[in-house]
Amino acid sequence: MKEVYKETTNKMEKTLQVLKSNLAGIRAGRANPHLLDRIKVDYYGTPTSINQIGNISSPEPRLLVISPWETKMIPAIEKEIMKSDIGITPSNDGKVIRLVFPELTEERRKELVKMINKYGEESKIAVRSIRRDANDTLKKMKKANEITEDEQRIGENQIQSITDDHIKKIDDIIKDKEKEIMEF
């Protein structure tokens, strides 16, 4: 049964990591290089992250500067940024690309909070699905007489406890991100 707990915990932790990486891509009024993590550029036939084909810096709170190692990559990088959902128009001087992030409006902040809550709900659904799978595993173990009915009940309670813990972590992550977005 310990392996069921361990596997359940690992899967739920991975769900938390996915949530955190999704939220890292949502801007909160300040420029964050992680916003560009999901954008892939065609680099000699291979989809490659921008941070692997150039240097990304944030010299000011609302400015990102991308310095590609090869200046001929500038048009491709700009094209992918325009196609992405970050809503920023890049500008370049032939050597670097600048992304100026405007101040967030109240309306945009509320849209971002809705998006964050959607990510949180999807994560909770994933965690509950993992719980259901773990409980099914316990039922199969009971059916195969590997565990007793009492052990199954104890196991289900333990899995519920693990689930509650991860749901609370998801709520905390969402609350922190909401606070970060609304404070500017």
Image (cartoon, rainbow, N blue to C red):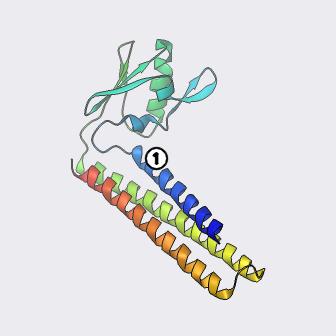
Residue at (25% x, 34% y) in the render: 61
Residue at (45% x, 57% y) in the render: 119
Q: Outermost residue toward the left?
A: 184
The spot of residue 152 in percent (x, y) is: 64, 82
Q: Above or below — where is 110 with respect to 39? A: below
In the image, is 78 to the left or to the right of 133?
A: left
Which residue is more in the foreground, 154 or 77? 154
The residue that mark 1 highlights is 21
Q: Which quarter of the picture shows residue 62?
A: top left
Task: Identify the element where label 1 is drawn.
Answer: helix
The spot of residue 143 in percent (x, y) is: 76, 82
Task: Count the numbered circles shown.
Answer: 1
In the image, is 35 to the left or to the right of 181?
A: right
In the image, is 4 to the left or to the right of 67?
A: right
Residue at (64% x, 66% y) in the render: 3
Q: Outermost residue toward the bottom?
A: 149
Residue at (62% x, 20% y) in the render: 44
Q: Above or below — where is 129 with respect to 98? A: below
Q: Outermost residue toward the right?
A: 144
Residue flagged by tag 1: what amino acid is it? Ser
The spot of residue 161 in percent (x, y) is: 49, 74
Give neighbour class at mark 1: few <14, some 14-19, many 20+ (Cα, 10 Å).
some
The spot of residue 168 in percent (x, y) is: 40, 67
Which residue is more in the foreground, 8 or 83? 8
Which residue is more in the foreground, 114 or 127? 127
Q: Above or below — where is 96 with respect to 1? A: above
* Quadrant of the drawing holding the N terminus: bottom right
